[in-house]
Amino acid sequence: MLDTHRVNAVFRVLLEHGRIKTLKGAKILRTEVRHGPNRFDFLLEHNGELLYLEVKSCTLMGEKVAMFPDAITARGTRHLIELSYLKKQGKEVAVIFLVQSTNVQYFMPDYHTDLLFAQTFLALRNQVKFLPLAIHWEKDLSLRLDTKLLSIPWTYLEREIQDRGSYLLVLNLEKEQTLSIGSLGAIIFPEGFYLYVGSAMTHLSKRVERHRRIRKKFHWHIDYLRAVAQLHAILAIRSSDKIECSLAKALSTLSQWSVANFGCSDCSCKSHLFGFRSDPLQIPAFQKLLLYFRIDRFESKRDVKNS
């Protein structure tokens, strides 16, 4: 369901079979509808009114939570804003997120990946109708027509969609280096991948951008390694809780080695820098860890009932 046109075809089938309860009786008037510089997927007639509708495919899921998008989507953010303008002009507007599994119960914007989209989503909750619809595919890839509308935990999102939390900095050191790291002294760094755990409970985006730069005044231990290693990835994990040490503890069970006392002078952890012989982004155990801290940890916070 990465093909937009396929997703729109699925929506058409569900609508024509009356499987979207909130849109029962709606009829498709046009597709690929232009309004100003923008183009929307559908123009419907519903309850005697015109309804502009966007359809998005959601394929990012944990055990009980689905999130969208899985990559930064400036176009998606622009669509939300333009739909809100149409709403101010008296038109009805909505976005359907077709979630590609009925095993999940909740839907959220992925504020870890695209903070601006998530902030826009939250700000427009009373202007744009958001319909996260879970669908089910059989093993032969036939579509089962029963659907499930997922819950959006608004109270949780109000607290969590902030520019704060932790991050994972992934570096690739192509050959062994001996570096002098501040008060730690000379340290031998074997070639391989390094995963550093950091945090910024304010202005997380600025901290991430700082790590992208090579030329800067050295302040943290990681600055010395960043100067000689290739940047491979930076993964934000936004949270109102300080989870930096929990991340470090989890990563210590996956890595091949760690650098003692690195990046942890203000906590009791043994290290916040972990070494891997191969790319950690391709390791299933690391992918599962990332999904837990970004998505599935939501369930453990137990405030779902209040959302």
Image (cartoon, rainbow, N blue to C red):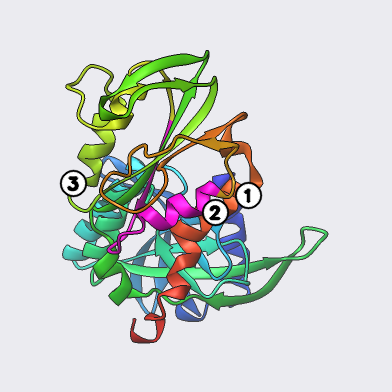
Does 24 appear above or below 134? below
Identify the magenta region: 233-252
Amino acid under disc 3: His
Q: Nearer the viewer, residue 216 or 152?
A: 216
How far across and down, in percent of the image, does residue 169 sit?
A: 40, 36
Residue 64 vs 305, above or below: the answer is: above
Gap in angstroms between the C-alphas marked 2 and 1:
6 Å
Q: Residues within 10 Å of mark 2 (few under 14, many from 20)?
A: some
Q: Are marks 3 and 1 in contact (CB under 8 Å)?
A: no
Element marked by disc 3: loop
Q: Which residue is mark 3?
A: 203
Image mark for residue 32: none
Lateral position of residue 73 relative to residue 5, left or right: left
Mark 3 crowdedness (10 Å alpha carbons): few <14, some 14-19, many ≥20: few
Left or right: residue 231 compared with residue 138: left
Circle nearer the N terminus (2, 3)? 3
Residue under circle 2?
A: 289
Mark before the other along the chain sequence, 3 or 1? 3
Hey, which quadrant is residue 276 in on the image? Answer: top right
Give how far apart the Cα atoms at labels 3 and 1 are: 29 Å
Can see residue 69?
no
Give the percent coordinates (x, y) of residue 208: 28, 37
What secondary structure is found at the residue carrying circle 2? helix
* Residue 58 at x, y percent in the picture: 52, 56
Identify residue for label 1. 285
